[in-house]
Image (cartoon, helix red, strand yellow):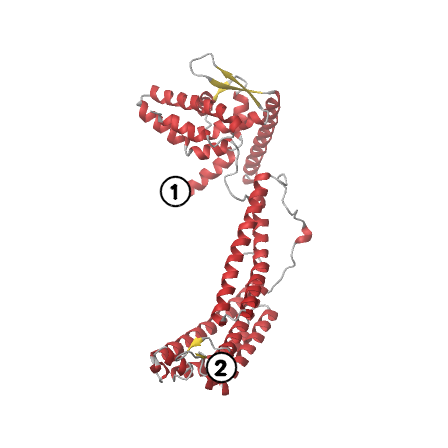
Amino acid sequence: MSTLTDRYVAAAACGVPERQRLDVELELRASIADEIDARIESGESPVAAERAVLTAMGDPARLAATYSERPQYLIGPEYFLEYQRLLVTLLAVIVPILVAIAVVLSIGENDGFGGVFGDGITAGIFGGIQVVFWTTLVFVILERSNATQGRPLMPWSLDTLPNVDQRQMAVGQTIPSLVMLALFAIAIVWQEVAPFVPGTGDERVPVLNPDLWSFWLPVLLVLLLAEAVFEVAKYRVGRWTAPLAMVNTVLNVAFAVPFAVLAWQGDLVNPRFLLGLDWPEGAESGSPLGMAIAVGIAAVATWDVVDGWMNSIRSSQRSHGERLVPVL
Amino acid sequence: MSSMDDVTAAHLQELRRGTVVLACLLVLEQPGYGYGLLDTLSRAGFEVDANTLYPLLRRLERQGYLASEWNTEETRPRKFYRVSEAGRELARTLTADWERLDRAIAGMTSGMAEEKKP
């Protein structure tokens, strides 16, 4: 039967390159035996001594990696920043393109709103996974092959320092907001023009009450446009200010009050859609559905208003703070 | 309190990191083998783990600072390491730097004592 030492040495040796293996194995065996002997001499039992020595040596796989000087990480500090930078850039560029292509193809196939939405999400997730996988693989190979001999991939110089920018709004926040607003507007028009949810029987009906197109839904589209203009304005100002928070409040109230009232009265959701769900009472005034939507609208709007004011207070404190306390 | 001690221990480890290499190069003027060297270093106050020292010896050998030879005359064959000419040169360089640092630190501490006097 093999001893613990045999098993330990074998486990460590199999992680060491072939040409060093025998040498490492013999040396390790001798060192372990020496150490065990020393412990036995100082009064330990042979079994306890062997266990103590091998335990102190630690995981044999780690020892083998140290012996063969293999990096015990996927991407080290040498390449990590470039890896991170490239990954973020590629994800930001490639994923939206893939989503756009998938959405266009899906629209061509006439899958309906749900199908197009699903295709876009799927393309985004799988594209993202591919980008992460291949980028990581390339960097792992770079790391292992020591291709740049310890020099950074992209040499850093003073010229690459970005300009100091006081703005706290990044394009990275504004563009997603604009995209969300556009998608919201498209969804509102789409569900009316090409209905995809079932009504009674085989017919497809809009989700929102078509009667609202006489006034409130056009108002909603105008409000979305105003919100988009507001986002651009916020980006150009560069940070939240009290006037911006005020405009934000007005926009939110203009949206939330009429639509929460409509929802509460049961006028927001298409009654034919609710009929298809066997839930005609959902269209009654004060129905649980209407109340839930109204409360949801009020909650989101309140949160957005409070968030806007908090941000404007915080950013004015920050700009004062910079002037009063130059060194923190 | 214990986290404070951890931080201290980490700084001490950082400070001592390179000294094990120098100690090995100096001790191995006389041929030595893995466990024997571990014992010698620990007696001299260098607490180094076996799983750090053994791979370190091999690395220094690969870099040409140590030469090795198997001794098979005794019942237990052992690999003996001995410092090479390049290793001796490295030891001189490291020792000189060590002394320079020691003088610099001594200068700083006495300089601080001077400043406090008046």
Residue positioned 43% across, 23% down in the render: A29
The x, y position of residue A67, in whole percent, is 50, 30
Residue positioned 57% across, 49% down in the render: A83
Task: Please state which of residues A197 and A6 is positioned toward the viewer in this rendering.
Answer: A197
Q: Quadrant of the image for the C terminus of chain B?
A: top right
> Where is mark 2, residue-wise?
A254
The x, y position of residue A140, in whole percent, is 55, 44
Outermost residue, bottom direction?
Answer: A214
State the separation of the CA atoms marked 2 and 1: 58 Å
Residue A178's place in the image compared with B108, above or below, is: below
- In the picture, the disc for residue A192 is none
Residue at mark 2: chain: A
- In the picture, the disc for residue B2 is 1
Residue A162, by quadrant, is: bottom right
Residue A75's place in the image compared with B60, above or below, is: below
Q: Is residue B47 visible?
A: no
Residue B116, by quadrant, is: top right
The x, y position of residue B111, in whole percent, is 57, 36
Task: Please state which of residues A151 and A203 is positioned toward the viewer in this rendering.
Answer: A203
Residue B26, by quadrant, is: top right
Disc 2 is placed on an element classified as helix
Q: Quadrant of the image for the N terminus of chain B?
A: top left
Q: Give the crowd class for mark 1: few <14, some 14-19, many >=20 residues within 10 Å.
A: few
Q: Is residue A132 visible?
A: yes
Task: Please state which of residues B53 and A110 is positioned toward the viewer in this rendering.
Answer: A110
Residue at mark 1: chain: B
Disc 1 is placed on an element classified as helix
Outermost residue, front direction?
Answer: A202
Task: Name the amino acid, label 1.
Answer: Ser
Task: Name the amino acid, label 2.
Answer: Ala
The x, y position of residue B29, in whole percent, is 55, 18
Q: Are marks 2 and 1 on the same chain?
A: no
